[in-house]
Every structure is written in structure tokens, then in C-alpha cells.
Amino acid sequence: MPSSTGNVLVMAERWRVHLSRGVRALESGDYDQAQVQFAQAHRMAPDRAETCAALGREYLRRGRIDQAEPLLRGARAKDPDLLSAVAALARLLGLGRGRLGEAQALIDDALLRHQSEPTLLMVKGELLLEADRIPEARAVFERALEAGGDPEVARAGLARTCNAEGISLSEDGQDEAAVFWFKRAADLDAAWAGPHVNLGVVFARLGRPGRAREEYERAIGIDPLNPVVFFNLGNLCRVQGDNEQAARAYQRVLELAPDYPHVRGALADSLGELGQFERAIELFRLELERNPHSLNCWGNLGLAYACQGEEQKAEQCLRRALELDPNYFNACCNLAGLLVRQDRLAEAAELLRRAVAIDSGRAKNWFARDERFAPWRDHPQFGFLASE
């Protein structure tokens, strides 16, 4: 019978071996092996706070919160000062379950005994940020950094508070002030593309498309698999009239996230501007399967059909757009142009009167510039649109 002393590990302590193996597996990125080892440690010592916490944290990392919660609660009950369990349980409750009050109370209770513990402070910052208490969250992350917390994690938390501050200011129409906070967020976390995406949006709104494009390209350099930045880049290129680049950006969004909202319609718009009507029609129809009430898609699908010479389908689409919104200006004018080409002048005039009621200046300008109306500009049917 082996001795329980010296270099021989007694069976009752073998759970520590599995716990250590799990930690090493985590450090090497072998998460499956980590779970195996933590589960084995817990089977051997289910009453130990350490094994409950280790397996609970691993389940939480995998998003299995229903399995994680009882383990983490058990770990805290067995050892209220096992801070890794307290922090994980607070994250689970606040960020996973949306029970912010309970989570904050848990952290505050632990902070009464461990006032400058960086791990607890960083979780408290995360919870405050989730609750949109942005200045408080920033102050807590700064305390965590001063207390010796992981600089990378603390700076990432600070970056998120700065980014949130920028979003809040931008939503209030204070884009110039928002730029400062987005830049600070980018400086704090150079590996995060989010602030650069937001800077791109703000610079575009401020009428600085060159700077906006630079920020989107920086974001792509950091995170080339981010569909949001490609969609925003596509929108910027469309506004600038660069439909080829816009189409490439939208196509990339489709490759990265096939269910991304409205991307098929946006890509179809760009392709229509490039004269690629067949592909545009295909994409508009696919988008309408997802969003059958899209005025833009019905209207532009009608235009694409008209450009292909399929006037009956074009008319059906434009009328469908007007069924959804009788005051859809573009559909009024485009359908009027189609009807003029078919010599249906009374119907066209009625649609143009509706367009004038919606926006008289724009309607008169449309009539004066659209070549479809050129042979009919002196026709008495359209006298109400004569140039002033």
C-alpha cells in the first residue's frame, strides 16, 4: 500500500492534478481539454469551491449559463472570498441574465472586503457600462488600472466607455465632440475596430468623406471580417458616386454575413447604376422576399425592369410601391415617365400633380431635366409644370 506522505499523492488530492492540467490547457488554448480536466476535477471533489469555480467559468465561457450558474453559486457559497467565482457569477447574472442589480450587489459586497481588487473593479466597470452609467464606469476602470489590474483588459474597458460616450454625443447631434471620444477609444485599444467604424460614420456626416474612408480602411486592417465596416464603406462610396467600389464592398458583406440587413438591395442599387440590370433585378427580388415592404426595392426594381424594356413588370413594381406609400415621390415621377413613353399622358399628368403636392420644386426640376418628358414639355396636359 503506497504511503500518503513523501512524493506519493493521495487519491483524495488527485483533483488538484486535474485542476492544474485544466489551467495549463486553458493557457495553451486547448479549451476542450480544459473542460475535460475541470470536469474530472469536479467529479473527484464536487464540494471544493475551486473545482466548482473552474468548471463553472469554463461553462460560462462557452455560453452554457444554465450549467454555469449553479456551479458558480456553489463556489461562492463554499468560499465567499474566491474572487474568480464572484467575478464570473456577477458577469453571468449581469451580462448573461440581465439582472444588473443583483450582479452589482454581489460585486459591491465583495468590494467591502477587497476594496482595491482589480478583478472586482473591472467587473463592476463592465456592469456600469452595461447599465449606461458611462462616467461611473470610466472612473472604475481607471481605479482598476491604478490598482494594478491587467493593463490590456483595463484599457479595453476604458476604450469601451469612451466609445459609448462618443455614441451618446453623436446621437445628440454633437459629432465634433464625439470625434474626441472615438479617437481616445481607438488609442486605448488599438486592436478594436469599433471606434474607427464610428469615426468613419461621424466624419461622413461632417462632410469629410476622405477622412471617413481612411477610418473605414483602418477598421478593415484591424478586423477584415467585420461586415459592418464594409457596409458603411459601400454607403460612403455610393454617396461619392463610386458605384464600382460600393458594389465590391457590398459583395464582401454578402460573403461575410449573408443575412446582413438590406445589403442585397444596396448591392442591387449599385449594380443598377453600373448598368448590370439582370443581376440587380435578381438581388432586388431576393431582398423583397426578406422585406416585402421596401419602397426603395420596389421602386428601383421597377426602374431596372424599365431599363431592360420590360415595361409591364416595371409598371407593376412602381404601382406596388405607390400602394405601400401613395406619397412616394420617386415612384410618382418614374411611373409618370414610363406612362409618358406609352403616350398615357392623362395618367402621367395625374401622377406629376401628386408629385407637385409632395415637393413642387423637386417635381418641376424633375420634369425639366428628365429626357423622357422632353417631347411633351409644351403639351397642354403638363402646363401646370411649365418653367417659371
Image (cartoon, rainbow, N blue to C red):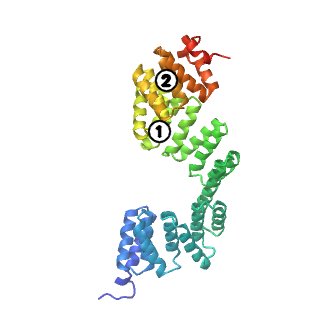
Crowding near pointer 1: few (<14 within 10 Å), some, many (20+)? many
Rendering quarter of residue 380: top right
Residue type, numbered disc 1: Val
* Above or below: residue 177 compared with residue 68: above
- The image quadrant where one finds the N terminus is bottom left
Nearer to me, 171 or 181: 171
Question: Residue at left 42%, top 20%?
Answer: 311
* Residue 374, x across and y down, in percent: 56, 13
* Residue 278, x across and y down, in percent: 40, 26
Mark 2, secondary structure of its residue: helix
Crowding near pointer 2: few (<14 within 10 Å), some, many (20+)? many
- The image quadrant where one finds the C terminus is top right
Nearer to me, 210 or 125: 125
Residue type, numbered disc 2: Leu
Task: State how far apart marks 1 and 2 are (Cα).
Answer: 25 Å
Residue 8 visible in the displayed image: no
- Indicate left or right for 38 with 162 as reference: left
* Above or below: residue 287 compared with residue 347: below
Nearer to me, 138 or 383: 383
* Above or below: residue 197 compared with residue 207: below
* Above or below: residue 254 compared with residue 132: above
Q: Residue 335 carries which label?
A: 2
Nearer to me, 327 or 47: 327
Rendering quarter of residue 106: bottom right
Q: Nearer the viewer, mark 1 or mark 2?
A: 2
Count of numbered circles in the view: 2
Question: Residue at left 67%, top 39%?
Answer: 206
Question: Residue at left 40%, top 63%?
Answer: 31
- Indicate left or right for 206 with 337 as reference: right
Mark 1, secondary structure of its residue: helix
Q: Mark 1 points at which residue?
A: 263
* Residue 149, x across and y down, in percent: 60, 67
